[in-house]
Amino acid sequence: MLDILHDGVFVRNGREIITNPTIEKTEAANNTMAYGILNAHNSQKSDGLMHLKFDALASHDITYVGVIQTVRAAEKDFDKFPVPYVLTNCHNSLCAVGGTTNSDDHAFGLSAAKKYGGVFVPPHIAVIHQYVREEIAAGGKMVLGSDSHTRYGALGTMGIGEGGGELVKQILGRTYDVARPQVVGVMLTGEPRAGVGPQDVALALIGAVFESGFVKNKVLEFFGSGVANLSMDFRMGVDVMTTETTCLSSIWETDAKTEEFYALHNRASDYKKIAPAEIAYYDGLIKINLSEVVPLIAMPFHPSNVFKIEDMDRNMRIDQGIIAGCAGGLYESICGAAEILQDKGLGFPLAVYPASQPMFLSLTENGIIAKLMREGVIVKTAFCGPCFGAGDVPRNNGFSIRHVTRNFPNREGAKPNMNQEASVALMDALSIAATAANGGKLTPADKLISQIPRYFFDSKIYAKQIYKGVNKPDKAAELAYGPGIRDWPEFKPLGENMLLYVASVITDPVTTTDELIPSGETSTFRSNPYALAEHTLSRKDPEYVGRAKRAATVEIPSAVKALPEFSENLAVGSLVYARKPGDGSAREQAASCQRVLGGLANIAEEYATKRYRSNLINWGMLPFIFGEEPPFECEDFVYIPNIREKVEKLEQKIPAIVIGKNGGTREITLELVLTATEAEALLAGCLINLYKN
């Protein structure tokens, strides 16, 4: 089914591995599709890094307020978005909790689109990634989004999901700086068997590479004879899930089906033929025989926890099913589910969310919605809630099967701090439908779907609902502030010396951004940094917030003052230790909340994703590395003399002293690897300060 080659390989025409290439490795590496696009977007080539400028930006309603507030704090005379910036409303669109907060954010977003020349997509009209697929993606272009599932590779567009700080840089004319990423080829052969959908292929890939970190921060490049055997919906359904491999981005070869997609969406000129050059070099290769992929399930609590459905307990109790979002709520997945369910009824409650209103309309006109409703399916509007815990929360100890992007702990909306637990398994829409049709017994789909009616895209829905103000800023427009929208606090520049109060020590193998700052109900507070910060680490370490606040007033121990290196010129703040923090969401609040509470640093064995490390730096927190067991406990201290000087000099080995609660001391060496640009942000105290100054 899947074979991994960890060593570099040369590939001819995206179809065969060759061992006697006629060109050098360096030249062949630039022959990939990825580097054809990356090199075209690289604005500077002198320092070994890539300095990328993107063609478009995208955010949703739990990130765009923070992005715009950061831009305004950094540059008070800001007056125009430099590239198309799409503000969608697909996360807090229920407006069900928090009073007027969510609606106030939406009013702010519309006013910002008018004032600065952006695109505003109202609630229930489209989930962020489906809108970008339909209206923004274009062959050979790049899109940066403040959502981790920013992936449009199947359309020949490289998408990267990052924290809001990276969008701020683009808006203010700076660049996205990254070391030249490696490219891993994904060679597809064969064609899917009956009952296999895009989620099955995606889970096979995630299950094979996540734990080893084989593709971490690399680009996945899809090619091979099997690509032509996949519809565009199938390709997009696989592509959006590549985020769960921890790769940086993705790109696919394009063909007549891709061209048809653009033409169908009234954008024929945005199609571009993209394919690897005759001989391309890849830093690794994953070979997937689509014919051998079987229906899979990712059990709680990670998309990589993959098993064959046929090997599972068929009598497992299932309380709920959901097909939704940028991964599951696609036209063909919904049509296939309807065909499998026809005249069968449901073995458990099932909800379906088409990913956009034009898609919903086509499903309605083609009779698919009627078929679903006759079988008892609840059909809802475009919404991302089932992916992060807003709406459709199962009962306590409930088990939900979902075709969505993630099944992290409490992504279904349960609150463990209130003694609520539930769980989600990921499956393809086809197998969810087969399970529902079989009385709720876990069942792999085995039906060849044959009755998918042609999809028609009606752009009039968007024309009547969406504000499109690209290149039309209205300087006289006023931003609409609600009481839940607060400015960022002032952050001080990096001190000469640093004393860190250990506020949390997390020794789990991986710490997700959901655990650093929970999703779900806390999304209501995303526009209020003070209110949101109160929820930091609430599910993982409920005492953290109190400890972090204590760092500002804690008495400096006499053992610290007795150190020969001690200086009164001292910055005191809190520290979070985690072995591998930052897996999952791009949400910058996982870092900014720590900073609001006085955080100055993280220490980790490694960082799970580039985006979490970038978030730390953009908010002025040092991303230290320490490869040994943590030599401290909560409420110990770590003293780092001359830290400002060491950051200025880009020193990588940072001597530090651990001072225990009992007064004992231990010398350690932390690692801090920074680029000059990253050091500038840290010295300034955060991105806002850097640009303001």
Image (tube, rainbow, N blue to C red):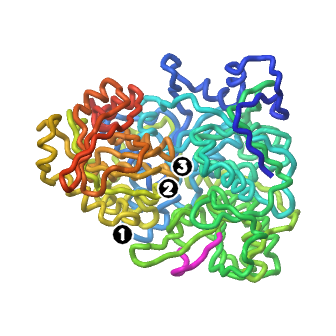
Name the residue located 66 percent from the left edge and 48 percent from the top edge. Answer: 209
- Magenta includes 394? yes
Q: Which secondary structure, mark 3? A: loop
Residue 509: mark in rendering: 2
The kind of residue on which mark 2 rests is: Pro
Front-lying residue, 183 or 116: 183
Is residue 417 positioned above or below 455 on the image? below
Q: Name the residue type under label 3.
A: Ser
The prevailing secondary structure element of the residues shown in magenta is: loop
521 vs 10: above or below: below
State the residue position of label 3. 148
Question: Which tag, 2 or 1, sits closer to the chain's start?
Answer: 1
Select label 2 or label 1 by which is in front. 2
Residue at mark 2 to residue at mark 1: CA–CA distance? 38 Å
Image location (x, y in percent) of residue 340 = 81, 72
Give the camera-side residue of 223 and 90. 223
Tag nearer the camera, 2 or 3: 2
421 vs 312, nearest the viewer: 312
At x 58% / y 26%, what residue is drawn? 41
Residue 573 visible (yes or no): no
